[in-house]
Amino acid sequence: MAMASTAGKTSRGMTREEKKVIFASSLGTVFEWYDFYLYGSLAAFIGATFFSSAPEATRNIFALLAFAAGFLVRPFGALLFGRIGDLVGRKYTFLVTMTIMGLSTFLVGLLPGYASWGIAAPVILIILRMLQGLALGGEYGGAATYVAEHAPDDRRGYYTSWIQTTATLGLFLSLIVILIVQASMSKETYAAWGWRVPFLVSFLLLGISLWIRLSLSESPTFQRMKDEGKGSKAPLTEAFGQWKNAKIALLALLGLTAGQAVVWYNGQFYALFFLQNVLKVEAQSVNIMIAIALAIGSIFFVVFGWLSDKIGRKPIIMAGLALAIVCTFPLFRALTWAANPALATAQQNTRATVTAAPGDCKFQFNPVGTAKFTTSCDIATSFLTKNSVPYDVVSTAAPGTAASVKIGNETVESYDATAAGDQAKAKDAAFAKAVYTALRDGGYPLKRAAAKVPDQKLEAFIAANPELKLDAAAIRAGDKATVPTDQAIKDKLLTADEAAGAPEVTVYTVPGGGPFAMFADPAAVNWPMTIAILFILVVFVTMVYGPIAAILVEMFPTRIRYTGMSLPYHIGNGWFGGLLPATVFALSAYKGDIYYGLWYPVVIAAMSLIIGMIFIRDTLGTDLHTKQ
């Protein structure tokens, strides 16, 4: 690939028109990423609203995979809109993609949940996510190509780096809007319907973006090529049907974008998921910490884009991959100690052992979240995974016997859900309570919520919880409320038979008698250290992502640039990156180690580092006007 030297060239200042191009392209792309990442930030609420029929243990994976559905179709959006962009033009193509993205996001905010529409609700949700993915597949390539074709050769890394900030700024904007909405209402109201407000705001952002972008002119490089009649008549065939161009796309995918993608999603989105769902840090605190790290670190997208105009694109991207490979495991372990030291200490001191019969433990890599764990071993390991407890499996139990969980000096017998039949729910409650009690005794940070107990079940509740040393008379004299029987049945406090025809039910509040939950003590969270670790992860992201647009647009000729660069970018980011959260979470669940899944981004980044170092040539100095 011939490189044109930049040596001896004098950099000029950015013109008013170039500033407008960068601002309009970047602002519109920020809003598109805002739309796209709202789903990821609100996955817990979306899971509860649209996947309420699924077992609680699988909702996280369900929600993450619906999130990933948008990523899976991104390459198809790249093909569809990349072809249109190379045939019709850059400007009008990304106006269409923006409209599709904005309307799809707005409709998510209006879509009723599973309780109202049944299975139609999650189906429509996934369709809207796929439309978002198609739109984003066409947006990024158009914006990056459009800015690059306006930039002088010796400042293209700096100019396009502003586009690279948009994904992070879109995530940052989504977190800020979420925090503002959360602060304006109670937690109950937010969980009920308030989480929809950020989706509805996207309609306003869509209007602003369209108004700004309509004032732009077509890319001068594309317009010149079109006027000269040198445009491609079949961009897809030319880009991927001819080996000389297909080879470039393949190397761009395996040597650049796959590694860049896993570093990006690991350092930003999975870090958010890890803090909230694995380390059990309160969601609002997680959003604030991520937002601070992004606010501090985002300038480095531009710094490394600018630096790539001086020393090249490849050295910076390869260095970022190498640092991410070496530092991923130490940083996530440090994150555990900073954000939830009690959990880190307990994991270090108390490891569970699951003893099961041979063949009772199944392979639990469950990326689609549909498997129902029924064997005694799978029930035990699934429970431990959900609560971030490391464990070892020993297959020494006699065939036909139930698995057992040993935590410290306590041993709890699991159960087979199929054999339990109608008693499965009761056995599950007893198993969970016994394991939680053992974990609490082993030093795990657990809290127990208050219990709501109807008068008809009070004596049985006291008998079932002797460790609480409850007194019926004291409870009856304490906090209580009179609740209509229908409401009590709806809240599953008792059954109609237990109510025995009574129109109202007296419900007592028993502090510390409800379900257990693992948590991160807010007072023990080391905010400065957590933010510092997140900032380092963001810096790695900026190293691999800041120069990526420049090197991609410089690898392909003008006539197929939109199509050629979009596909490897969106396969890398849509498939390798988009599937990262669900893959990492599922691998960690399979192994019984919250860090095990991190091998996925490390291995993919290592692949790109090796291929990139050997086969990718730096593109610094490429003249886009002559590269047709």
Image (cartoon, rainbow, N blue to C red):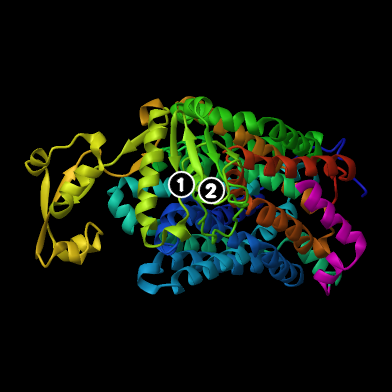
Left/right placement of residue 133 relative to residue 231 reads: left
| Residue 116, picture quadrant | bottom left
> Going from the N terminus, do you reach mark 2 or mark 1 first?
2
| Residue 570, picture quadrant | bottom right
Asked whether residue 14 is in view, the answer is: no
| Magenta stretch in the rendered image | 233-256
**Mark 2–mark 1 CB contact (< 8 Å):** yes
Residue under label 2:
377
Residue 242 is a magenta residue = yes
Residue 92 is a magenta residue = no
Label 2 is placed on what type of residue? Cys
Asked whether residue 575 is in view, the answer is: yes
Where residue 105 appears, x then y in whole percent? Answer: 48, 64
Left/right placement of residue 359 relative to residue 373 reads: right
Element carrying mark 1: loop
Element carrying mark 2: helix
Q: Is residue 389 above or below residue 76?
A: above
Residue under label 1:
414
Majority secondary structure of the magenta segment? helix
Picture residue at 33% right of the left edge, 36% below the top: 447
Label 1 is placed on what type of residue? Ser
Where residue 164 appears, x then y in whole percent? Answer: 65, 47
Where residue 490 appears, x then y in whole percent? Answer: 24, 63
Q: Is residue 509 above or below residue 193?
A: above
Quarter of the C terminus within the rendering: bottom right
Where residue 530 appears, x then y in whole percent? Answer: 50, 29
- 389 or 105: nearer the viewer: 389
